Image (spheres, rainbow, N blue to C red):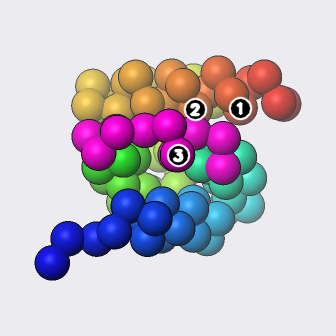
Amino acid sequence: MSELHEHRLKRLKMRSMRRGIKEMDLILTAYADDTLHLMDDEGLANYDDLLNENDQDLYQWVTGQVPPPERFEALIARISVQFQGTG
């Protein structure tokens, strides 16, 4: 059985809030609140995959310390723009 869209959004928002490091909690929670409802199924699947990555790696990608894997480049770029706009 497939997950309802509303449940998927709630699950992804919760996973965004409950990260391993506080910085990623803040960054991903803000991004999720502002953006997830605008994403199509493919975008949500990519974001879901991103949430499986290590927080230290995510933080380095978002802050530009290390380039992200190609499959996450566009998503990380959008998260980084939002992060830098609020930082």
Say whether marks 2 and 1 touch (CB < 8 Å): yes
The span from disc 2 to disc 3 (Cα, nearest Å) is 15 Å
60 lies above or below 6: above
78 lies above or below 4: above
Left or right: residue 57 versus residue 31 is left
Taking the spot 68% from the left edge, 28% from the top edge, the residue there is 82
Q: Which of marks 3 and 1 is in front?
A: 3
Q: Residues within 10 Å of mark 3 (few under 14, many from 20)?
A: few
Q: Residues within 10 Å of mark 2 (few under 14, many from 20)?
A: many
The span from disc 3 to disc 1 (Cα, nearest Å) is 18 Å
Q: What stretch is highlighted in magenta?
A: 33-43
Residue 4's quadrant in the figure? Answer: bottom left
Taking the spot 57% from the left edge, 39% from the top edge, the residue there is 35
> Residue under circle 3?
37
Left or right: residue 87 versus residue 74 is right
Q: Which mark is residue 83?
A: 1
User: Residue 5: percent from the left, percent from the top?
Assistant: 38, 61
The residue at the far right in this view is 87
Q: Main secondary structure of the magenta part?
A: helix
Q: Which of marks 3 and 1 is nearer the N terminus?
A: 3
50 lies above or below 38: below
Amino acid at pointer 2: Ile
> Residue under circle 2?
79
Q: Is mark 3 on a helix, strand or loop?
A: helix
